Amino acid sequence: MGPRLAGAPVREGAGPVQRHLRRLGPHVSADATEACDVAIVGSGVAGAHAAHGLAGKGLRVIVLEAGQRRSRAELTRTFLDNPVKGPQSAYPPDPFAPFPEDDRYAEFYVQGGEMPFIGAYLRLVGGTSWHWTGFADRLRPNDLRMRSLYGVGEDWPITYAELEPYYERAEREWGVAGDPRFVWGAPRRAPFPQPPIPPSALDLALAPALAQLGLSAGLFSHARNAVPFDGRPACCGNNTCVPICPIGAKYDASVHVAKAQAAGARLIERARVDLIELDAARRVAALVARRPDGATLRVTARHYILCCHAIETPRLLLASRQALAPNGVANGSDNVGRWLLTQANQDCQGLTRDPVLPYRGPQQTSGIEQMRDGPFRRDRAAVGTSFMNSGWSGNSDATRLARDLIGQGLKGSALVEALNQRISRHLRLNASAETLARRENRVELDPVLRDVAGIPRPRVTFALDDYTRRGLEEALKVNQRILDAMGASYVTWNAPYLSNAIIAGTTRMGRDPAVSVVGPDLRTHEHPNLSILGPSTHVSAPVNAPSLTIAAMAYRLADRLGAPGGLD
């Protein structure tokens, strides 16, 4: 049989999880061993900041990363050469550590629900932060108290006051750029470290129509340099933030991987953790990792932190079934993989009467202030509407339009003139709605299909409820009115679809072990020396990027573990 693409389906007989465990142990006789104070799995935002915080306290830290370090120049070239211009297009497939590919989501995820799940994440040093939009926004206090305030969803087991000092530290580390007039419902004690990213030409073109409709727009806060900061240049408006900033003006977690290493942490690349080994007391005894040459690495520590994002974390826990954890590690209550969260999107677009000049500056700089929070959340979801500064279809917009015009017989200067005249008037409004946690929405291991690395593929079940649909319906009405005020023709909108940017909730935190996996301190309920960090622990997915909250909670966890007795 010839080589397989990463994520391609592989059919084998029944019981892949059991065969996978038989290959590894438990109690594996390893080819190599390492020991440390804290072992971290994953080097994205969660792992990088946890390692940075812990190494800075003098602890011996090892970070295990299934992927490898890639240079920005290499990734930029891959993006430019790739005819597919989606969020994964800058990142070469990796058969050793597979992840979803833009045109092959159905070959990676086994779809078990009513809506296709297309969560995009990466496995390389720096993680998925390489292709995030760059939003650096805090959760609102109200986001953490949905059940108490609005009677829907669940309250987080931590407060905004607990998070605020760690938000401030993360913002200082990143050099967040923001406008103090626009805090989006999250009160601030400290100023933004950098001045705001200025509004785009498209933002300015929209302003009169918004005012006419009684709407207001606000500037987003960004982990994107408005001025040179920390050895990285200011944003120059390449407009390829997703999938890659070619100059490094947009922050990614490889920055803090390097800072963690400078503080003494060790990074071991190409070490794919396949098994969490428990001892007789049900404490974690070791992490067992596979290397590309087939060798096995066994890492022991006083404390272990899983930072593998919201798909790989439950995959690893569920794949680590053993006698003392027959349903998987940390899964005695059958909550691992459940309570999956994302956001639901809907686009409304049209050809405006006058030019709005997209593609000048970052891909998103402003959005509508209304509909993000308020008493309406009792009945319908909060929605964040962003002004997409990337035409109708992002990085592939010009290519698609050029093909259409060529098909109409245009060529030469007539083609160029028509292309410029059309694309300068492309306006797209993206509405992104929160979803409520439901136990039935979940990630589990497929009983038959494996990925190219031999690991059971993630089977995802997700259904969208009426609460979220009502939020999107309201946002669509508003966005249609905006396009009408812009004199737009050819106005179209798509059906709601699941976000490829937000994946959360699959090992959520809570005080009740019957409905959660970790406690407020991120320690698993079942294993005292195992913590989980990242969006998988989040209780809700409001209309915010989760990344700043992940970094804040990483420093909070590092403070707890680094305190006297914190590792005990």
Image (cartoon, rainbow, N blue to C red):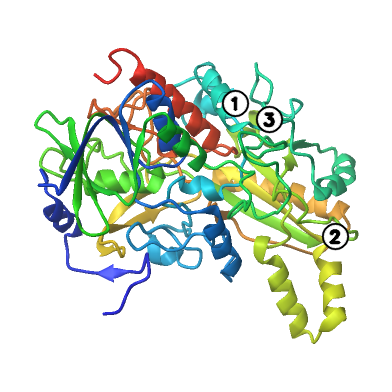
Numbered disc 3: secondary structure: loop
Picture residue at 60% right of the left edge, 51% below the top? 345
Is residue 13 found left or right of 60 in the rendered image?
left
Q: Which mark is residue 184?
A: 3
- First reached walking from the N terminus: tag 3 or tag 2: 3
Crowding around mark 1 (Cα neighbors within 10 Å: few <14, some 14 to 19, many 20+) is: some
| Picture quarter with the N terminus | bottom left
Picture residue at 15% right of the left edge, 36% below the top? 278
Q: Which mark is residue 172?
A: 1
Counting from the top left corner in percent of width and height, residue 455 is at 26, 58
The answer to whether one can see residue 152 in this image is no
- First reached walking from the N terminus: tag 2 or tag 1: 1
Crowding around mark 3 (Cα neighbors within 10 Å: few <14, some 14 to 19, many 20+) is: many
- Residue furthest to the top in view is 564
Is residue 358 found left or right of 274 in the rendered image?
right
Counting from the top left corner in percent of width and height, residue 61 is at 32, 31
Vertical position of residue 493 compared to residue 289: above or below: below
Q: Which of the two residues, 514 or 223, is positioned nearer the viewer here? A: 223
Picture residue at 80% right of the left edge, 46% below the top? 200
Q: Which of the two residues, 284 or 60, is positioned nearer the viewer here? A: 60
Q: Which of the two residues, 289 or 385, is positioned nearer the viewer here? A: 289
Q: Which mark is residue 352?
A: 2
Snapshot quadrant of residue 299: top left
